[in-house]
Image: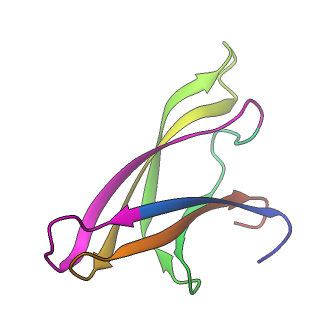
Amino acid sequence: MSESVKRIKLTVEEPAGISRTNWPVTQGVPFGRGELKQGSNIRIVTGDGTVLPAQGLTLATWGPESEYIRWLLVDFQVDLAAGETKELYLEYGQDV
């Protein structure tokens, strides 16, 4: 992973004891002022580096100029075994 890629850990848990395939996940992620600029690339990756298809939607921005994201809504799908907890990562930065 490049030094210009930043990561936020996301944890997904299958709570019902049922195996899931392409389980839809929606996660709100907060960002500090000046951390993520509007239009920046993001991606969701598994612990082994597999990139999952994902999309993001800006929910709120910092300040009236709206240049930086305050809250990002991320949607993606993941496979989970019954009762499995999986750590994923939202990556962003210059090399994403």
What residue sits 79% from the left and 59% below the top?
94
**Residue found farthest to the top:** 64
**Quarter occupied by residue 35:** top right
In the picture shown, does residue 4 fall above or below 32? below
Range of residues picked out in magenta: 12-34
In the picture shown, does residue 24 fall above or below 66? below
Left/right of residue 92 with respect to residue 78 in the rendered view: right
Q: Residue 77: x percent and y percent?
A: 32, 68
Left/right of residue 35 with respect to residue 14 in the rendered view: right
State how many labels appear: 0
Camera-nearest residue between 45 and 64: 45
Q: Residue 22: x percent and y percent?
A: 25, 74
In the picture shown, does residue 53 fall above or below 25? below
What residue sits 70% from the left and 29% below the top?
67
**Residue found farthest to the bottom:** 48
What residue sits 65% from the left and 23% below the top?
66
Camera-nearest residue between 32 and 75: 32
Q: Residue 29: x percent and y percent?
A: 52, 43
Specify whether residue 21 is painted magenta: yes
**Quarter occupied by residue 4:** bottom right
**Residue found farthest to the right:** 3
Specify whether residue 79 is painted magenta: no
What residue sits 44% from the left and 56% below the top?
55
Camera-nearest residue between 66 and 14: 14
Q: Residue 96: x percent and y percent?
A: 69, 66
**Quarter occupied by residue 12:** bottom left
Left/right of residue 85 with respect to residue 60 in the rendered view: left
Left/right of residue 59 with respect to residue 33 in the rendered view: left
